[in-house]
Amino acid sequence: MSDSLITVVVPVYNEEQNIKPLLDRLLPVVKKYQYEVIFVDDGSTDKTAGVVKKYSAKNPALKLISFYRNFGHQMALFAGYESATGSAIVTIDADLQDPPEIIDEMVKKWQSGAKIVYAKRRERQGESFFKLGTATFFYKLINFLSDTPIPNEVGDFRLLDKTVVNYLKNLKEKPDFLRGLVAWPGFPTQYVFFKRDKRFSGDTHYGFFKMLNFAIEGIMSFSTKPLRLATYFGFLSAGLGFIGLLYEVVKRILYPETFVTGWIGIFVAVMFLGGIQLMTIGIIGEYIGKIYKEIQNRPNYLIKEKINL
Ligand code: UDP
Ligand code: MG
């Protein structure tokens, strides 16, 4: 197995400062194997593509795919999977938050039979309390809602056997949430542990709203439970309304002299019901939006340029 090809896929979006430091650490690791490194430039507006080209001119194992515009991290990863020729495919961030050195351990676990090897974060550094909190909450929520267990504290730093990548390539749906799609079939899985470092240079591209959107994407892709919850909310509020009605009728029969104030009650009921209705329509809308996107079936990304591929 030591002569089999290892592909490393690196999605890059405005990472010009990080390419050299990444290669300085990644190449000594992958040189032990037959390797290719595929950079996927996700519509960078800085010199990222230029920097990669400079290195790929000297080394044919360093390859580049450039998109016309930013199609997002998941699509960049997917493009890497679609062009990878290795027997094992590792995806890693460009910002050195993921230590390339543990690829050796991942390869060992793969050689001993794992089809998926996740790098699991034991600790994270240089990330805000808020990001950690929201990430934990997200994993709890998605695992509560989803029928596919999505591994906790695992990002997109992982090794996949060719079999898994072929399964991904053959899916007919949008690869909007690769973590879930990778976990779904239940391939033999192993973990290696690491400490997540600070970003080497630049800022995260995942601000609050992007994270929130990604989380909603994940939930919608892997669960229809929100629709079920909406149904329960409907039953609950209808039930409450019915109890209220009974109470009113009984009170009027037994105590007809009671003066009716109660506008506050009506106000609360209207707000509550209105809220639930809007929420429910929103949830249904999200799923319809997803169906619409799948039916449009637009390409996942558009390639402007390929180097060494
Ligand atoms: N990235 C990308 N397209 C995007 C956003 C990010 O290709 O639209 C890349 C980015 O260059 C990096 C990786 O995806 O290599 C992870 O992004 P980032 O470090 O910003 O996310 P975080 O580690 O903060 O979750
Ligand atoms: Mg990062």
Image (cartoon, grey):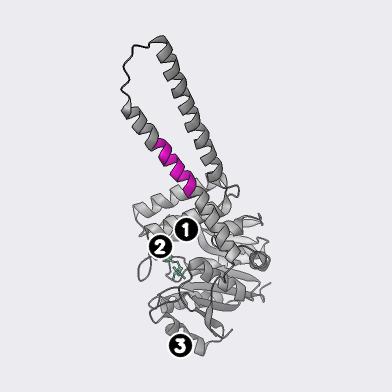
Ligand 2, seen in the image, is in the quarter at bottom left
Q: Main secondary structure of the magenta part?
A: helix
Which of labels 2 and 1 is toward the front? Answer: 1
Q: Identify the residue at horizontal 56%, vertical 55% (top origin).
A: 221
Front in this rendered view, residue 134 or 92: 134
Report, in whole angstroms, how far the alpha carbon at label 2 lies from the one at label 1.
9 Å
| Magenta span contains residue 309 | no
Q: Is residue 38 left or right of residue 260?
A: right
Quick check: 32 above or below 53?
above
Which of labels 2 and 3 is toward the front? Answer: 2
Dot 2 amino acid type: Tyr
Q: Identify the residue at horizontal 31%, vertical 29% (top origin).
A: 264
One can see residue 152 in this view: no
Magenta region, residue range: 272-282
Please, what secondary structure does the residue beneath circle 3 have?
Answer: helix
Dot 2 or dot 3: first in sequence order is: 3
Q: Identify the residue at horizontal 30%, vertical 22% (top origin).
A: 261
Front in this rendered view, residue 153 or 244: 244
> Is the CB of the residue bearing disc 2 within 8 angstroms of ligand 1?
yes
The answer to the question of whether label 2 and label 1 lie on touching residues, with beta carbons closer than 8 A, is yes
Q: Which residue is mark 2?
A: 206
Dot 3 amino acid type: Lys
Q: Which residue is mark 3?
A: 54
Dot 1 amino acid type: Phe
Q: Which residue is mark 1?
A: 214
